[in-house]
Image: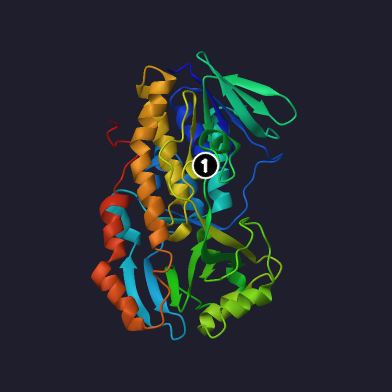
Amino acid sequence: MKKTRVIIAGAGIGGLTAAACLLKKGFEVRVLEQAPKLGEVGAGIQQSANAVKVLYDLGLREALEKVAVRPRDYEFRRYDTAELLHKIPFAGAHEQAHGAPYYHIHRADIHRILADAVRALNPDAITLGARVTGYTEGASGVQVQLAGGASWDGDLLIGADGIKSAIRSQIVGETPVSYTGYVAWRLIVPRSRLPADIMERVGVVWCGPKNHAVVYWLCSGEVLNFVGIPERAAWEEESWTQRRPWEELKADYAGWHPKVQAILDAADRNECYRWALNNRKPVFNWSTRRATLLGDAAHPTLPFLAQGAVMAIEDAAVLARALEGSATVSDAIELYQRNRVARTARIVEESTEHGGLYHIVDAEEMKRAFIERNPAKERAEWLYNYDPLTVPLK
């Protein structure tokens, strides 16, 4: 189906990965992005081997190595004393075990790298200022409606337009949303503002009572990323571009270790963001005959397994393979969905279960959680070894 005309709604990480995978295989692709300028906000994301294999296959290894950080270890430390509760070796061990490295990377960097890859394959593939509002489909194709009355015709529509997807709304309808009781803080701090010995080239999870924080380096080690997850009874705005007072952030981490305080004190006080973490149960049908969903539009997930962007990249690779190997668009959509729903549902559900795993008062309790349950070992056995490029499609 190399002449298949594919329309992708959304030029985020998932949409751009799908575009690059499809263009590489010879498909005609048009990405419709509502923003007037291509770019990405946010801070750090994590990319494990199951996604990095796809990025390498797209020829992006050199670009990634220039900006990403390979964490040596992941350390789990007590919030007040910095006692080391557990350590997981990452740098060489992850690549040796799973066939590709583990990266910490700024969301804007990976977005730029993917956008450059798409434009290198087709300079005209991305159309900006094009907000998709819905679609109609028939036996011979799909017509995508845009705000303002314009439309695009194609053979397949991929909804990669995020958690508030217009395509998801049309396919799935309204789905229940429940507040988890957690909020997420995010901020980034340049290395130049921090003490020289603030932390090594590792990821650190600071574990505390009803709260935890994840800290790691970005941008070749020149920027420190901080994500804090305190429990909060009141529901808040879900938008992750919502600025909140720095004083509220400091209050959430009162009494925490001096290294945590040093990070917060060095932050730009006008660039602290906080949003509500809401839970949505998995759906098991995200497609129609000529439209399907990808990434957060298909399976919005909480951040506790660090697999949100990874799943979108997996989706993109599997969908491209399904299209390449199927006789019709509808066959390809069925094959793609059939091979993705169970895995993505498991990741959504286990991410929810991990919400309070690092919220502790007693250090011995935390040690028992790792020794008896060993969640990292469990994940390694089924999560990181998945290869979207070679997994059999059934």
- Percent coordinates x, y for residue 362 in the rendering: 37, 83
Amino acid at pointer 1: Ala
Q: Is residue 247 above or below residue 89?
A: below
Residue 17 seen from this side: yes
Determine the residue positioned at 53% across, 71% down: 230
State whether residue 123 appears in this view. Answer: no
Along the line of sight, the residue nearer the viewer: 89 or 371: 371
Left-right relation of 67 to 90: right
Tell me the quarter of the picture where residue 77 sits: bottom left
Question: 71 and 271: which one is in front?
Answer: 271
Rendered location of residue 30, percent (x, y): 58, 27
| Residue 173, position as x, y percentages in the image | 54, 38
Residue 155 drawn above or below residue 258: above
Q: Residues within 10 Å of mark 1 (few under 14, many from 20)?
A: many
Q: Residue 38 appears at what percent x and percent y?
A: 65, 41
Residue farthest to the top, as pictured? 140
State the residue position of label 1: 297
* 56 sits left or right of 239 in the view: left
